[in-house]
Image: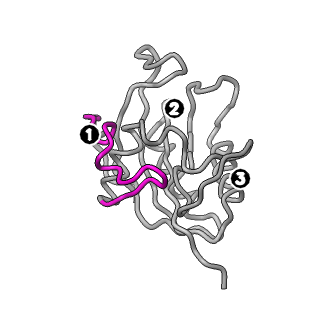
Amino acid sequence: MTSRVTAVLSLGSNLGDREANLRGAVSAIAAVPGVIVDATSGLVETAAIKPSGIDESAPAYLNAVVRVSTTLAPLDLLAATAAIETDHGRVREVRWGDRTLDIDIVTYGEVRQDDHALTLPHPRAAERSFVLVPWLEIEPDAVLPGVGRIDGLPAAAENVARYPAEALS
């Protein structure tokens, strides 16, 4: 029997029907063979972040975090999430551009990896309130490998807007 690993995924959308995009993504993730959705956060709304910083002129993002258990290897999970992004109309023309759907692997167990295909844990997760706040909602004792408990990180204490919707589950 293949062992299961817990992974944390961050979802975001700032184009189209953002809530429907995220709900569809959770359903698609749950349908991936070898993946079980264990928990989903509520939605938070944040300003778009571009390479130059916050872009108030861009559409705001809805964000959520999903915790899964999986038998997929990290690169196979990455391929599955990339296919879900594409199926939801994701176009990769501009780095950090507006998008219908973004799915990042934040953690994959305790794995630490840094190569051309995937960096684990996600290299900017510790700085992103739109990752940490919803993650704490579903896992109050969450730990970011190599960093520590996320409840002590400054970005986890930032005030992000809760989006008035039912949880994604």
Q: Is residue 114 magenta?
A: no
Locate the C terminus by quadrant: bottom left
Residue at which label 2 appears: 16
* Three-letter residue code for mark 1: Ala
Image location (x, y in percent) of residue 92: 69, 30
Residue at which label 1 appears: 157
Determine contact: label 1, label 3, CB under 8 Å.
no
Neighbor class of circle 2 (other Cα within 10 Å; few <14, some 14-19, many 20+) is few
Image location (x, y in percent) of residue 25: 54, 51
Neighbor class of circle 1 (other Cα within 10 Å; few <14, some 14-19, many 20+) is few
Q: Is residue 149 magenta?
A: yes
Q: CA distance from mark 1 to mark 3?
A: 32 Å
Q: Is residue 39 left or right of residue 37?
A: left
Toward which corner of the image does residue 89 lie, by quadrant?
top right
Q: Which mark is residue 79?
A: 3
Farthest residue to the bottom: give it: 1
- Specify start and end residues of the magenta stretch as a single range: 141-161
- Determine the residue positioned at 43% across, 51% down: 65
Q: Nearer the viewer, mark 2 or mark 3?
A: 3
Give the mark count. Answer: 3
Locate the N terminus by quadrant: bottom right
Q: CA distance from mark 2 to mark 1?
A: 29 Å
- From what the image shows, is residue 86 above or below residue 34? above
Q: Nearer the viewer, mark 1 or mark 3?
A: 1
